Amino acid sequence: MTSTLTISRLTKRFQGVEALAEVSLDLGPGMRVALLGHNGAGKSTMMKIILGLIPFDAGEVRVCGAAPGSSQARMQVAYLPENAAFHPALTGEEQIRHYLSLRGESPRRAMELLERVGLAKAARRRIGTYSKGMRQRVGLAQTLIGRPRLLVLDEPTSGLDPVSRRDFYALLDGLAAEGAAILLSSHVLTEVEARTDRILILSQGRLVAEGTLAELRRRAALPVGLTVTPADGAAGALAAALPQARLAGDGMLHLACAQDEKLGLLARIAGLGAQVADLDVIPPSLEDIYSHFSRRDGQ
Amino acid sequence: MIRRILSTAALEFRIALRNRWVAIATCLMVVFALVLAAAGAAPTGDIGADRLSVVVASLTSLAVYLVPLLALLMSFDAVAGEVERGTLPLLLTYPVARAEVLAGKLVAHMAILALAVGAGYGAAALAAVWTDPASTAGLPALWRLMWSSTLLGATFLGAGYALSSIARRPSGAAGLAVGLWLGLVVLYDLGLLALIVADGGGGFTTEVLPVALLANPADAFRLFNLSAAQATAAAAGVGGAAATIPLWQSALSVLVWPLAALGLAIAAFRKVTP
């Protein structure tokens, strides 16, 4: 199948400062990709270029086979801006009806879309009275218009409570299953973990890492943490048996080891028998992996 | 294309209705028109014109000030407001051309102006016909004033959109709009008057003045209505100049200015990067 979004060696400068440098990316139908990075790493800039809102200096961008921002591309791309905003004097239903008309769809579908994002009850209230989370849902509802082939979502879950977040990702899974490619940025790293096929990390305008979470985890090769809870009175003996462990104030023993030493260490601890009351293995979190990659590049 | 423009227009009209712009514009026009209708009753006997024609002459002077002001007040926020609210980036990712967005806003704002002008002039006309049945002779002049007022409004709406795009911030756009209104509607005429006095009937008055009057949409509007109306004699100010400029020239200016202003607005809006 052809790619929905192809970016090759994209470069964008703002007054001489490189906001994006030689970024390449390929996004096929049904793929969910998370774009991670600090504030100012270039996430929003990249999204705005894909949408055709701002020009770029070098490289090539193809959106559904067309130039970004061309009417052919705009027909097939949906966008959810960070902090979605609408005119406060309009109701949610009026706003969605308008967006439907702009995409050549029947405005009568507005209520159905608002129901899908759980906003049916507030549909006839003015957006000025909505909470941030509700505005975000209006923004989400408009991305569902007209079966888009590419969804560009800038921090889509900011302002949503955990339950709404889960609903939101369920909605995305449905869209991806129908063949839509999804590019989303997020600061909430732990939630992206389970919900995306691929992770991209941008740092100072450069793509510093790309791959599935497992690949990134392997490549980062960060140490695994182990926490051992000694049985009553066995702390001293346990500490002697595990010289590399650090005895913390809470009476627990903390260890760290490389990925390939993990199984051997576990076997050793298990061999200590009744001296061990409990054992927890703590794999490097996405936050650790993320800071590993984003720091590596000159920070 | 038509559908997208109409949907935008319907949305903008609704916003204007909720922001009470429709009510404010209509009330303002009705009140001023009725005051003029009452005040303009005095000189009727002297000049032999029907009462409505006299009212139309007064309404022309009113419209020159009020219609551009209303148009600029409605339009200065059109682009800058979207930028400030943060609604523009999303809108521009939709398959809608920037010209269509502006056209939609223009249709809505022109409709509001037409409504306000129609209600105001209509009220004044009713009052005139009530007291002087012969006033029906002035109806064609009233009709001409209505549509040319709406076109004058369209010119200043377009100018307002252009300023709104250039300023990017509502406060800056408001300042520019007030400046434009003062410049074109008030200071321009004062400047011309000063030059006429200084010139003393020389080359400026005969050669440059007609062009200068046609180049300003507000003056062209006044010229067009005064030279077309029977009641030229009842008018003050540039009435004398009206006689020397052919009607087709002022009509052309009244018709071309809205298109030029819209073109300017579209060009300025295209330069806005969200």
Image: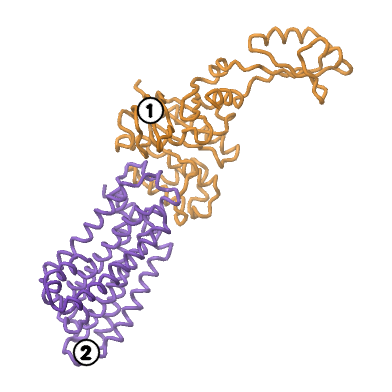
Chain colours: A orange, B purple
Residue A111 image point, x, y percent: 45, 46
Up/down of A37 relative to B150, above or below: above
Which residue shows up at 25% across the image and 55% down it?
Answer: B262
Residue A244 image point, x, y percent: 76, 13
Q: Secondary structure at mark 1?
A: strand
Residue A27 image point, x, y percent: 41, 25
Residue contact at pointers 1 and 2, CB within 8 angstroms: no
Q: Mark 2 — residue?
A: B44
Q: Nearer the viewer, residue B205 or B200?
A: B200
Q: Secondary structure at mark 2?
A: helix
Chain of the residue that carries numbered disc 1 in the rendered image: A
Residue A9 image point, x, y percent: 38, 24
Q: Is residue A236 left or right of residue A196?
A: right
Which image quadrant for residue B47? Answer: bottom left
Up/down of A249 relative to B7, above or below: above
Q: Is residue B78 left or right of residue A187?
A: left
Up/down of B94 relative to B47, above or below: above
Up/down of B31 relative to A63, above or below: below
Which circle marks residue A10 in the picture?
1
